[in-house]
Image: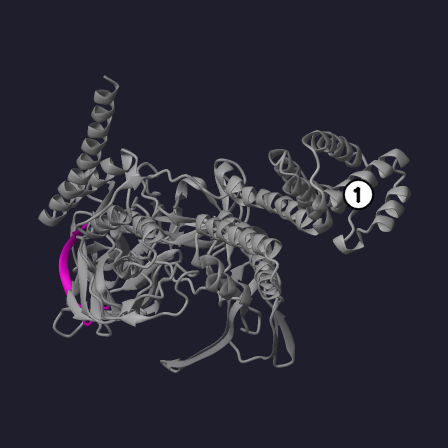
Amino acid sequence: MKKVFFYFLLFAWFLSAGQSNDLFEKGNAFYLEGNYQKAIDVYQSILDSGQHSGELYFNLANAYYKQEAIAPSIFYYEKAKQLLPKDEEVINNLAYANNRTIDNITPMPASFWDILNDAIVNKLTVNQWAKLSIAIMLFYVLSFSLFIWTDRTVKKRLSFVLALVAMFAFGLSLTLTFHKNNLDKNNRQAIIFDRQNSLSTEPNSLSDKVLDVHEGLKVFVKEYYDSEWAKVELSDGKTGWIKTSAFRLL
Amino acid sequence: MLAQDGVSFEAKVSKQELGINERLRVDFIMNEDGDNFVPPSFDQFHLLGGPNQSISNSWINGVRSYSKTYSYFLSPKNKGTFTIGQATIEVSGSVYKTQPVKITITAAVEQPKDPNDPEYVADQNMELVAELSNSNPYLNEAVSVVYKLYVSDDVYLSGLNVLDQPKYNNFWSQIIPIDKLEIERGTYKNRPYNYVVVSRAVLYPQKEGQLTIEPLSLDISLEVPSQRRNMFGGFLRQTVRKTVTAPSRTIQVKALPQIGKPDNFSGAVGTFDFSMTASPKALKAGEAFQVKLKVSGKGNLKLLNMPEFQLPSSLEVYEPERKENINTSLSGMSGDVTMNYTVVPSFRGEYPLPVVHFDYFDLASKTYKSLSSESIKIEVTEGPVNNGSVSNASEDRTPESNNKAFSGFKTQTLLQPIVSPNFFNSKSFWLWLLTPLLLLPLILLVKRYKVARSADVVGAKSKSDWQKAHRYLKEAKGALGDSKRFYEALERALYNVLKSKLKVPITALNKEGIDKILTEKKCKPSTISDLNNLLQSCEFARYTPSALDSMNSDYEKAAALIVELSKI
C-alpha cells in the first residue's frame, strides 16, 4: 500500500512538471502566432505555480517587448539574466529593450573596488562561494592530517606548506563569501515601472525634485523609509527618494 | 465814447454772458488814429489771441470814415462775473478811455448748433465707430475689432490720416492691413451711410477680466457744403479738418472653465485637428527620420504650445523646427502649425513612438477635447546593438556593439522551483564548514597514541621477553621427564624472565650481576638464593639426568619464582 502511494506521488510530480513544460510550449505557440498577450498570460501562470527558469523569463520578456511594454520587458530580461548570466541572447535583447528607455544615464566610471569585485567576488554566487569555502576547508583538514600523520620529512614539509596555504585560502574564501553576501544585500536592483516619476530629496511629495526618471530604468534600492518611500541610487551615483509603488524589485 | 471833438473810443465784447467753454472777443474801436494804446489787464481770462490790429479807411461821397480796432480773444478761467477794465489811448494829445464791461461766465453751454457751421455739419455727418465681434469672449478666443468711419451722403471725405494706432494691451493682436481705403455703402442708425474701414485687427485676449481697447484717433478732411453757391447755383464746398476719436470699448474676458481642464492643457482655444506622422518608418542606424506634429484648424495657432514628446535616449533628437502656415483674417487665425523633429537612431531595434496628446478648448461645444496621435513604430533594420546599455552599469561597463539581431524565444527549458534554498548561512553550511575541523583533534589523538607506543621500545621488549618466558615454561612443562630438554627450557624461561624484569642484556646475566641487580631491586634474599639454586640445578641437569620428582619440584619452584620475580 505504501509503495502504491509512493508511486502515485512520483507520478503526480512528473505530471505537474510535464504540465508546466506543456504550458511553456503552449506559451511559445501563442508567441509564434503573434498572440503576445495570451503568451504572457500562459507564461505568468507558470510563474504563479512557483516555477521559473531563465528561458521562461526570456520568452516572457520577449512577449512584453513585442507588446511595447518597456518596463516589464526589461524587468524580465534582467530576471533571465540573473539565471542565465552568460546567455548572449538575453544580453542582446536586453540591449534592444534598453534602447527604448528614455533616461540616458552615464554610469559612473568603475572604481578600483568595483573592478576588483567584478573580477573576483562577482564571479561566483554566494552559495558557490560558500561551497568553495567548504572545499578549501576539507582540503586544509586533509593536508593538516597528513602533516600530523606522516613521519617522513619530505611529506611532512609538503603537507605543512599545503595546510598553511589552504588555511589562508580558506580565510580569504570565507571573507569573500560574506563580502559577496553583503554586496548582494546592498545591490537590490529594481526597475522603474511608472511611466514618469521623479526622485525627490526627501521622502515626501513636497520636496525638491532631483531628476525625472522614466519606465525601464534600473535603480539600486539603498534603504526604505517606510513602506511607501525608498531611497534609490542610479548608476551615475545620483540618489533620491521615490515611492515604492514606482518600481519593482528584481 | 464819442467826444465832443468827434473822437470815439469804445470797448465791444462779442457777448456779455457766455459759458465757460465759450470764447469771448473783445474789440477796442476808435475812429481816429491814436497812439499809446494800453489794453486792460485780462488776468481773469486766458488770452487766446490778440491784440489783432485792423484799420479801415474809406471814403464815401467825400466823407472819410476811419476806424482802428484792437481785438483780443479770451477764454474764461472761472465761472462768475468779471469786469474788463479800461483801455486808454492818446489822440492828438488827449487821453481817451473806454468804459469797463461786465462779463458773466456761466456753466458750460451747449455749443451752438448752427446748421450752417461747417464744423457742426462735419460732426453731424460722420462718425468713427469701433465694431467688436464679441465683447464677452473666452480667454484666447479671437475677437475682431473693425474701425469704421461712417460718412453721410452730404459730405465728402477728402483725406484721412491715422494719427494713433491703438495699442492693444493685454491682447495678442494682429492688425490686418488695409491696402486701399474703399468706400462702401452701409446703414448706420437707420440712415444710409458711406463707410470706410479704417483699421481692423484680430485680438486674442491674454488676460481674464475687463480689458479696455484704447481708442483710435484719425485726422480727417471733410468737404462740407457751405452757404455759398458757385456761379452755376451749386453749393460751394468748404474743407474742414477734424480729429476724431472712437469711443473706447471694454471687453469682458471669460476664464476658461476649470471643470474638465486637462493637466497638460497648453492653452489652445479653437477647433483643431492633430496628427503625428513619421517618415521613413524603416531605416538604418545613423540615418535620419522626421517626426511631424501637426496642429491644424482655427484658433490661437500662433499662441499655442505644441505638445512635446520624449523619445528613448538611444534616439538622438535635434531641435525641432516650427513651421507656421497661418492665415489671419477677421475671424481669427486658421491654418496649421507643424513641429518638425529630426531624429537619428544610433542603434538598431524597434522603437515605438509615444502616443502624443493634444488638448484644446473647443469653442463650439465649450468643452475641452483631447486628440491623440496614432501609434507609430520605427524600425531600424541595420546597425549596431547597444550593449553598453544605460542601466546595467555594474555588469557591462564597456559599450560593445555588435550586429546581432533581436532573438526570438527559446524552445527548451528546465523549470525549477522559484524559491531556491539559500545554502550560505544555512545549518548545513555551518555543519559542513565546522565538522572537518573536529577531525583534526581526533587524528591528533590517534597519532599521539601511536607515537607513545612506538616510543616505549624497552617496555615492548620486556613484554616480549616475558611472553617468551611463559612460552619456555610451557615447553618445560611439556618436556617433564626428558631432563635435558626440560632444564634447557626452564633455564631459558628464567633468563627471559630476568631479561624482561631486569631490563639487562643477556650478556650481563652472570651470577654476580644477577645477584647485584636483584639486591639493588630489593628482592628477598630467599628469592635470590632460590633463583641461584634453580639455575645451578639447571646447569647440573645438562650433564646428569635427574629424576622426574626433582623435575617436578624444580618446575614448581620456577613457577613460584616467576610469580615472585614478576612482582619486582
Residue positioned 28% across, 64% down in the render: B175
Amino acid bearing label 1: Gln
- Rendered view: B166 above or below B533: below
| Spot occupied by residue B282 in the image (x, y as percentages of width and height) | 15, 66
Viewer-closest of B24 and B139 = B139
Question: Which type of secondary structure does the marked residue at label 1 adopt?
Answer: helix
Q: Quadrant of residue B225?
A: bottom left
Residue A16 covered by magenta stretch:
no
Of the 4 image quadrants, the one containing the C terminus of chain B is: top right
- Rendered view: B207 above or below A166: above
| Spot occupied by residue B159 in the image (x, y as percentages of width and height) | 25, 72
**Pointer 1 chain:** B
Residue positioned 59% across, 53% down in the render: A149
The residue that disc 1 covers is B536
| Spot occupied by residue B289 in the image (x, y as percentages of width and height) | 20, 69
Q: Is residue B230 visible?
A: yes
Q: Quadrant of residue B494?
A: top right
Q: Is residue B477 left or right of residue B214?
A: right
Q: Magenta segment, which residues?
A: B177-188
Viewer-closest of B38 and B261 = B261
Q: Is residue B235 visible?
A: no
| Spot occupied by residue A179 in the image (x, y as percentages of width and height) | 54, 53
Q: Is residue B435 left or right of residue B206?
A: right
Give the farthest residue toward the left: A33
